[in-house]
Image (cartoon, rainbow, N blue to C red):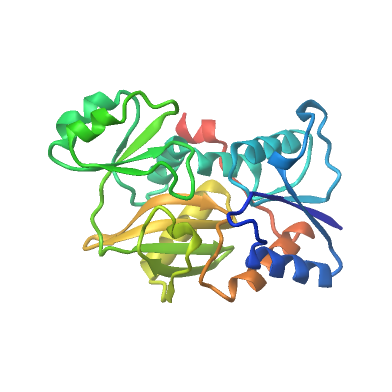
Amino acid sequence: MRILFLLARRQPPVPSPLLEEVATTLRSRGFEVDGVIAEEHLFSPDRLAASYDLYVLKSHTELSLSLAGALAAGGARILNPYRACAAAQNKIVAARLLRDAGVPIPDCWVGNAASLAELIAQHPVVAKPYQGHRGVGVRLIRSPSELAALGDASIPLIFQRYVAGCGEDLKVYVVADEVMAVRKPFSPDSFSRPGRPVEVTEQVRAIARAVGSAFGLGLFGLDMIETPHGPVVVDLNYFPGYKGLPQAAALVARYIERFALGSIELTYRDVCESVG
């Protein structure tokens, strides 16, 4: 059975230790495993055909996500499923699905940013590119003047009400029903740093499972901020890096193996049905 990983460029350009271990494990179990960085190849999207038994979408770039969609349209099996990844990557759609699932999230807004000036005078917001990842382009907006300094964004932004926490993010990582977590301070490059493993509370576990069910995701991560009223989800990522969790590679490899062999099926609600 053949598996292809859709990968992202890494900086520095060194292999992911997690994916190296996952690939080694899968090969030891008889799978043929390859990887491709979409931006380094040329494709004809109208003629893409499934030449692998399973495509594992690790990259979060728009090109990789779109190619996964083209492959899925032609009948390819994608992990996580393409439409689940597309919904998770789009923070506007994700906000609706999370709210519908009863997941605690900050109030958020999109559209005419200037209309937020009065609100921002009373309470900060966090501006994020609506399809961003790895913290790129995230800004804390504390005043109307900082809002005006954003100018006309070339891509839509989503504005989340700022949630004060303990100074560290709770990074929650999920493999099927296994929920793990680390804590680490947020910074523009914090995605590349491992955190400190911590125990997962039942409340966090329940939130993670609700998200997986709402989106039809089996491999995903959540950024949470812990408040006196409980954890709040501020971001969602399909197939995260699982940094700081040495046991994650074995769990991920086993999950991919079971999915490839048909032992696991992920179901997701059609987004149009969910928001209609």
Examine the rendered structure and indicate whether residue 72 appears above or below residue 24.
above
Q: x and y percent of residue 201 in the render?
A: 38, 71
Query: Which residue occupies 53% across, 40% down?
Result: 87
Which of these two is toward me, 56 or 96?
A: 56
Q: x and y percent of residue 272 in the render?
A: 53, 30
Q: Is residue 45 left or right of residue 246?
A: right
Q: x and y percent of residue 138 in the render?
A: 37, 44
Query: Which residue occupies 76% across, 71% down?
Result: 25
Quarter location, residue 34: bottom right
Q: Is residue 158 left or right of residue 82?
A: left
Examine the rendered structure and indicate whether residue 244 appears above or below residue 38.
below
Query: Which residue occupies 40% across, 52% down?
Result: 188
Q: Residue at the far front: name it.
A: 12
Q: x and y percent of residue 17 in the render?
A: 64, 67
Which of these two is toward me, 102 or 91?
A: 91
Q: Quadrant of the N terminus?
A: bottom right
Q: Residue at the far left: name it.
A: 122
Quarter location, residue 71: top right
Examine the rendered structure and indicate whether residue 92 appears above or below residue 200.
above
Query: Which residue occupies 66% across, 73% down?
Result: 250
